[in-house]
Amino acid sequence: MPDPQPDDPLRQLTPEECARLSSKTQDLPYPLSVTDAEQIEEEVHGAFLKYGTAHAAAVAMVRRIAEMKAQKAQLLNTLDDCSESLRQALVKDLAELNQRIADTEQRLKDYRLQEGLEN
């Protein structure tokens, strides 16, 4: 199957397009971060974004990990103060977030290995 054309509305966005999309949402009540946009694209299309180089991909993974760890800190604070009725859902969310962090850390290791091979 040929690669989708740039004007194809069903094609996966590039990392640069994800960044532009994020910047256009910053005045909304719930803006998307670049990481949010990238992860949505990857989930919708079932494929990793193409960053161009292993170094660019590694930089993106470092950013993602930092954002997810900040989300985890917020989630842990919320867990401390939540009602029992919410606790089960938040614990599930925490487990999913921990898995996404682990997956992204593995991707970072893989990109760093590739980066070493590119040099």
Image (cartoon, helix red, strand yellow):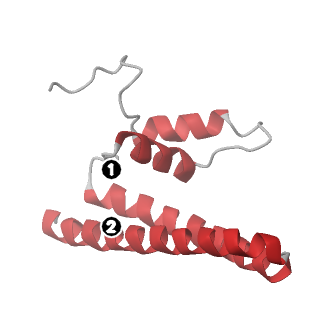
Vertical order, 24 against 60 (above or below): above
User: Can residue 66 be seen at all in this image of the molecule?
Assistant: no
User: Can residue 15 be seen at all in this image of the molecule?
Assistant: yes
Vertical order, 45 against 85 (above or below): above
Looking at marks 1 and 2 on the same chain, the residue that comes earlier in the sequence is marked by 1
Q: CA distance from mark 1 to mark 2?
A: 10 Å
Numbered badge on residue 107: 2
* Label 2 crowd bin: few (<14), some (14–19), many (20+), radius 10 Å: some
* Label 1 crowd bin: few (<14), some (14–19), many (20+), radius 10 Å: few
Q: Nearer the viewer, residue 81 or 60?
A: 81
Q: Amino acid at mark 2?
A: Arg
**Point 14% across, 26% down: residue:** 1
Which residue is situated farthest in the bottom direction here?
80
Q: Amino acid at mark 1?
A: Phe
Vertical order, 109 against 53 (above or below): below
Query: Residue 102 location, x and y as percent?
Result: 42, 75
Quadrant housing residue 58: bottom left
Quadrant housing residue 110: bottom left
Q: Image quadrant for the C terminus?
A: bottom left
Q: Residues at badges 1 and 2 in contact (C-beta under 8 Å)?
A: yes
Query: Residue 94 location, x and y as percent?
Result: 61, 73
Vertical order, 35 against 90 (above or below): above
Q: Nearer the viewer, residue 61 or 98?
A: 98
**Point 37% across, 16% down: residue:** 7
The residue indicated by pointer 1 is 48
Numbered badge on residue 26: none
